[in-house]
Image: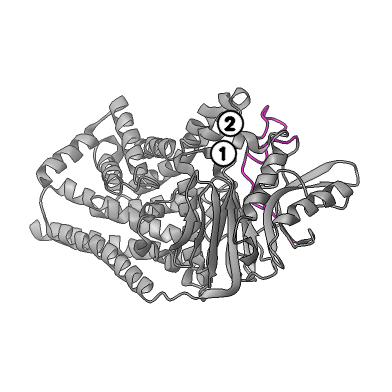
Amino acid sequence: MIGFLSDLSGRLGALSGRRRIAAAVLLGAAAALALPPLDLLPFAFVGFCGLVAMLESGVAASSPRAAFWTGWWFGFGHFTLGLYWIANALLIDWQIFGWMIPFAVFGLAALLGVFTGLATLATCLACARGFPRVFALAIAWTCGEWLRGHVLTGFPWNLMATIWDFSPTMLQGVSVFGAYGLSALTVLVVAAPAGLLRAGRWRYRDAVTAVIAAGLVAGAWAAGSSRLAAADIGIVPDVRLRLVQPNVPQELKWDPEAREANLQRMIEMSRLPGFETRTHVIWSETATAFPIWGDNDVLAMRRAQIAAAVPPGGILVTGAPRVVRETDGSLRAWNSLHALDQTGRIVATFDKFHLVPFGEYVPLRAYLPVDRIVPGTIDFSAGPGPRSIEIPGLPLASPLICYEIIFPGKVVAPDERPGVLLNLTNDSWFGQSAGPYQHFAAARLRAIEEGLPLIRSAGGGISAIVDPFGRIQAALGLGQTGVLDADLPMSLLPTLFARYGEAAFLFVLVSIAISGAFVGLITDRTASHRM
């Protein structure tokens, strides 16, 4: 069997021209099948072992340019399949935005492919062969993910760590070294069999490297299993949550004729039986599709209307646009979160700080003849950054609107640790696609990284309460309509990642580099004995 796979690996490496491009695209797409919601883990091995084979032999083994383009085409296939769901947002108003679909899907995949291309270029320049090349790829790929999460506005979506979404046990490692660290270990493990495929037969170094790769998986699983076995999470006293998921179709959410009916529906759902026992009702991002912040009679009337959904003596949290007229007469808008008490008074406000390009604002608007996808005539402004806010009756909360929660190490204020992550989102833009599942997977990783429980309210799903170990305590699935009543788990002491952030991730990269050098040393000594 090893001989057959070795021959297949050699054939992949020998491909050239269009066949090589097609193979790289298909291998990248195969690796994307391991992501949520499919969670087809074996395809990650297929994709990355094939990528190593293509880098190990043929023109890419000696040509930095060919190595870059091999990785770029791999990334193009990986991100095209992994992010296809972005097209759904443009289909909501397809007559206006439909023409952007090729640019949004294939253009974004092409841009993100630069990071995978740089990773394979760095792997080639490392001049490592065999198993050391696998170690080099794991380091380079993860550095590419880190760059992808930081360059420009950053987009750390679908980090390789998320392929373990089906296993809370394996995810526990992010509490120590974060999602980037788990990505590094993941790439090392799924690419390691490529060394066996190249060898064609077992050798001493093969056994050593196989033990290292297997030991990493076994160690991560054992540590995660031990952590979960000792997990005894209490409940925050006197907090009884109700998450409301109205599942309003996105095409009706901003319809002027439907807004009133949508709001009334939210109020009625909030007041379903058990309402009097709740302390906090949580609505989703822009659940209130019109401003409620300000000092005029119309806004006061809206707040009084919404106050009907506030439980007795409790609080309602909702997303809503916030609009302010400046002294020069111009308008500014924010995508905001408001907490209201039973009198309709706003007691806490948070403005989204990490905006979605082309969704909430248009980069280089003066030069690009396009409108933002979210309805409105002006771009949203950015808030001041992650911060903790006081919502009566809740632990200190770190609000995160929409995809703000996908950024490792960027979800809590550095100087004021909260007791809960509060994520409001509206994934209805993406329908019944992979997007909402991937978004939820990223949110769970943040809970584990920070050791904080997560309250997540999504207009069309997935709404959930997640404990600080990433375990789902209660949830409403994608496309479901209803309310979710649940208690709030308590937080943990700061995790190692919460304390040291990306320093822990760097420790993983250094450890992999040392292991790779060790394997390379074994290779050199074995070769010397044979001479």
Magenta region, main secondary structure: loop
Residue 274 or residue 195, whichever sits in front: 274
Q: What amino acid type is highlighted by mark number 2?
A: Ile
Q: How is the image coloured?
A: one colour
Q: Position of residue 381 (x, y in %)?
A: 73, 47
Q: Which element carries disc 2, helix, strand or loop?
A: loop
Q: Position of residue 224 (x, y in %)?
A: 35, 68
Q: Which mark is residue 490?
A: none
Residue that protrudes farthest toward the front in the picture = 273
Q: Which mark is residue 429?
A: 1
**On screen, 451 above or below 125?**
below
Q: Which element carries disc 1, helix, strand or loop?
A: helix
Residue 445 is covered by the magenta coloring: no
- For the magenta stretch, what is the residue range? 348-377
The answer to which of marks 2 and 1 sits earlier in the sequence is 2
Whether residue 435 sits left or right of residue 422 in the image: it is left
Image point 69% across, 40% down: which residue?
Answer: 261
Image point 61% across, 55% down: which residue?
Answer: 272
Q: Are marks 2 and 1 in contact (CB under 8 Å)?
A: yes
Q: Is residue 408 visible?
A: yes
Residue 249 or residue 227, whichever sits in front: 249
Residue 350 is covered by the magenta coloring: yes
Residue 143 or residue 416, whichever sits in front: 416
Whether residue 196 sits left or right of residue 98 in the image: it is left
Q: Quadrant of residue 405?
A: bottom right
Q: What amino acid type is highlighted by mark number 1?
A: Trp
Q: Which mark is residue 92?
A: 2
Q: Position of residue 78 (x, y in %)?
A: 39, 39
Whether residue 132 sits left or right of residue 204 in the image: it is right
Q: Is residue 157 visible?
A: no
